[in-house]
Amino acid sequence: MHVHSLLHMHGRLHHHDLVHSILQWSALDWWPPVGWWPHPARDLLAGGTGCTASATFVLPPRAESVHSARSFAMGTLTGWDLPELADGMELVVSELATNALRHGLELGAPRRREAIRLSLIRRGSLVTCALTDPGSATPVLRDPSPFEPGGLGLHIVESISVRWGWCPLTPQGKAVWAVLAA
């Protein structure tokens, strides 16, 4: 089914049905329904939403997907005329995509579909970057030792975004998201 058809279909659902359908989707088939916004960041929408739009890109489980994710995000922001978000979004997408590839996939699992989706959702001058993966591990801000390579990705996301978080998807997977403001 084409993305626009799926989004159009969700546009006709009642609120209860829409919430129920979101809770029943796993990381393997999640697309942001029309009007989706992370619940812990809904207070940021007070005072109107302005322009709304969304774009989703499926990332294959390969290292070069991080570059593809950044390119997709930059192209989307250019199309939305939000160049002021480019530098921050590029870092956020890089960190979240890397984490999804590194911690969200079960690469040894036989014959399982492993999918990561990058979705950008615009509500006025706010853009949420959401990455879904099939992993069940909780994203954790950790304090790596001074000589440990890496481990600061979520600190970078936290410092750039207005708010970030994650939510489990049923029956499997999670969505990790960050909201950036123009």
Image: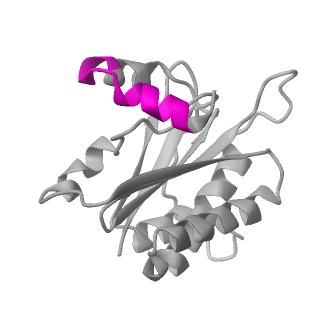
Residue sitting nearer the eye, 159 or 177: 177
Q: Quadrant of the C terminus?
A: bottom left
- Residue 24, percent from left and from top: 46, 18
Instruction: Report whether 150 appears left or right of 139.
Output: right
Q: Quadrant of the N terminus?
A: top right
Q: Dividing the picture into quarters, in which one does residue 10 lie?
A: top left
Residue at the (27%, 20%) spot, across then down: 14
Residue extent of the magenta highlight: 4-17
Q: Say if the magenta span includes residue 16.
A: yes
Residue sitting nearer the eye, 7 or 141: 7
Q: Is residue 151 visible?
A: no
Residue at the (67%, 42%) spot, across then down: 116
Instruction: Report whether 90 appears left or right of 176.
Output: right
Image height of 153 relative to 169, above or below = below
Q: Dividing the picture into quarters, in which one does residue 27 lie?
A: top right
Q: Residue furthest left?
A: 47
